[in-house]
Image (cartoon, helix red, strand yellow):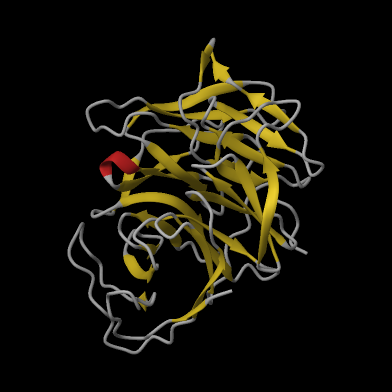
Amino acid sequence: MKKFRMMSFFFLLGPSFLPNFIIETDTGGGNKPETAKDEFKSPELEKVASGLKFPEGPAWNGKDTLYVSNCYGDWITRIKADKADTFLQAPSKPYQFEKTNGLTVYKDGSIFACEYGKGAILRFFPNGTCQAVSEGFQGKRFKKPNDLAFGPKGDLYFTDPLAYDKNNLDGVIYMISADFKTTKPVYSGLGFPNGIAFSSDGKFAYVCESAFQRIIRFPVKEDGTFGDYTVFVDLPGGDPDGIGFDVEGNLYAAHFGGGGVYIISPDGKIKGKILTPGKKPSNVEFAGDDLKTLYITEDETNAVYKTKVDIPGLRLFYSPEIK
């Protein structure tokens, strides 16, 4: 287990690069971040797992285990007490899965997963069995399911992108009903929809639209579908990827290619940035009995890191009880 001590003001780029916490002023859509004038006492960033293959989709089981996808591999990693092993490896019976991306743990301990190799939403049970929850819409397979989140009424939402192209808006957001029997699109015509998260009251859904390097916000209608979006924040210089809220409404956004995790206030202002050892942080997850441990998956170093935060993470809808 390797630890990195964060520095408050300055860091050296190079082989001995150390992650850092910086506080930024509002970038106003792409200005260079500025270091805060007042000293910020940074926590440690600790590597808890390495040797993964494009880690993604960290998901906490509410007790003692973090699950992580290996997008360029064929297995799901399990991290417990900062030790990693393999939870599942393809093929898994009775459903033969190939590659998973976004994960989320349901209230009963089962894991829902975006399977982007075949284009499906899967459910893994604690005993290792796997079943397909939804494999397509109107006779067509999903494209590349990316990330997923339960909404306030128990419906499961997931993003389904394909082209990373501003001129080919083929991305769709789908909703699977709370009884897991029906699937329908709730919004289409997006430029690579990626990470998804809900506000604490469930009235808004936030989605990373990576092709436009921005996060957009949708009002959630009574029937669970989405109204027209507004742009919540632009994050140039990288792709907003996985996201998660704390209890005060701040949004943590992995900035893939930008080398850090942005902390964004409820009104869309940049409050700070957690710098990562590599340039490709892909996702975040709050964990621990107080939800004050932030896990970060990072794809340049193929590792998982953690750090302590002062504000607890927001407990996800329909997630297991915290023990």
How far from the left and from the top, in percent, is residue 52?
Answer: 53, 53
- Decide if residue 122 is on the left or right side of residue 73: right
39, 81: nearer the viewer: 81
Quarter of the image with the C terminus in it = bottom right
Residue at the far left: name it.
Answer: 31
Number of numbered discs overlaid on the protein picture: 0
- Left or right: residue 210 versus residue 2 is left
Q: Residue at x 68, y 50 (%)?
A: 86
Residue ranking furthest to the right: 127
Front position in the image: 36 or 220: 36
Horizontally, residue 84 falls left or right of residue 116, namely right
Residue at point 36%, 35% (across, down)? 192
Res 228 → quadrant: top left
Q: Toward which corner of the image does residue 10 lie, by quadrant?
A: bottom left
Q: Quadrant of the N terminus?
A: bottom right
> In the figure, 233 relative to 154: above or below?
below
The extreme top residue here reads 139
233 in relation to 311, above or below? above
Residue 84 is situated, as x and y percent measured from the top left of the image, at 66, 60
Q: Please determine whether, in this image, residue 204 is positioned above or below residue 314.
A: above
Q: Residue furthest bottom?
A: 39
Q: Is residue 137 visible?
A: yes
Question: Residue drawn 36% across and 38% down?
Answer: 229
- Residue 139: where, in percent of width, then height? 54, 10
Q: From what the image shows, is residue 151 above or below residue 140?
A: below
Q: Is residue 223 visible?
A: no
Q: Relative to the observer, which residue lies in front, 7 or 246?
A: 7
